[in-house]
Image (tube, helix red, strand yellow):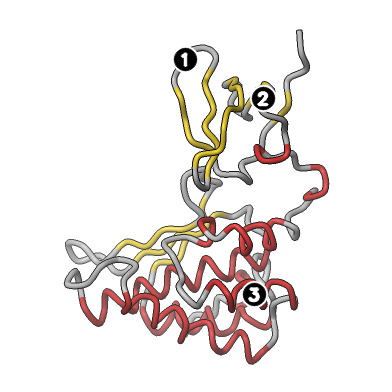
Amino acid sequence: MPDFTKSLARYMPEAAAPIISQWIVDTECRFRISRSRSTKLGDYRAPFQGQTHQISVNHDLNPYAFLITTVHEFAHLKTWTQHKHRVKPHGLEWKNNFKTLMTPFFKLQVLPHDVTVALVKYMDNPAASSCTDLNLYRTLKKYDQGASEVITVESVPIDSVFSLKNGRVFQKKEKLRKRFECVELATGRFYLFHPIAEVIPVPPA
């Protein structure tokens, strides 16, 4: 029987790795460590044309974000196995499965206290992504490498100019509900930015 514990321990808390390894074996899931994706932290794909379940998780997440994202995707797998496409992707069934699957990790106390507190609060009504819960997202981001050096959209002044890693340049505008409206200087188009989106300030000309 394959054992993925050693490989998984490179990406998540060591005590959590045997449990996730067993889940992979039990579900015959194809589990993949993915390149960094700006649009999502992880992904689940249901069996299709004879293939098995597929889960991918971004390689560059900190250990706690990696574990939570992995559990998130396994909750999708469990929900699909129980209900196929008859329920909403992040409906009550998924929420209950996510809570159930997180239980052993709370018992093992593999998460720091502040992450546990934020996650318990998030689990009162878990959403499509941990990124949508700012308290949990901010708490997890503290454990990223070089976190103290990160500059975010919410931390730069209104009307200031910033760029992204891909070179696109924006000017920050007003906050609309939970996100900031920013205009791309090259096109004049407006985009909504997550408050914790990482940016590079551009000095005034």
Is residue 109 shown above or below 156?
below
Cα–Cα span, label 1 and label 3:
49 Å
Residue at the image point whose x is 56% and y is 70% from the top: 68
Q: Give the mark, 2 or 1, whose residue is nearer the N terminus.
A: 2
Task: Point out which mark residue 6 bears.
Answer: 3
Residue at the image point whose x is 50% and y is 39% from the top: 176
Q: Dot 1 corresponds to which residue? A: 188
**Residue 149, how many percent across, how many down?**
81, 42
**Residue 188, how many percent across, how many down?**
47, 15
Q: Secondary structure at mark 1?
A: loop
Quadrant in which residue 155 is drawn: top right
Q: Amino acid at mark 1?
A: Gly
Quadrant in which residue 113 is drawn: bottom right
Q: Give the mark, 3 or 2, whose residue is nearer the N terminus.
A: 3
Cα–Cα span, label 3 and label 2:
41 Å
Closer to the camera in the image, 44 or 34: 44
Is residue 111 shown above or below 46?
below
Q: Amino acid at mark 2?
A: Phe
Residue at the image point whose x is 75% and y is 58% from the top: 142
Q: Dot 2 corresponds to which residue? A: 162
Q: Amino acid at mark 3?
A: Lys
Q: Is residue 117 left or right of residue 92?
A: right
Looking at the rendered image, the disc whose residue lies closer to the viewer, 1 or 3, is 1
Task: Point out which mark residue 177 bears.
Answer: none
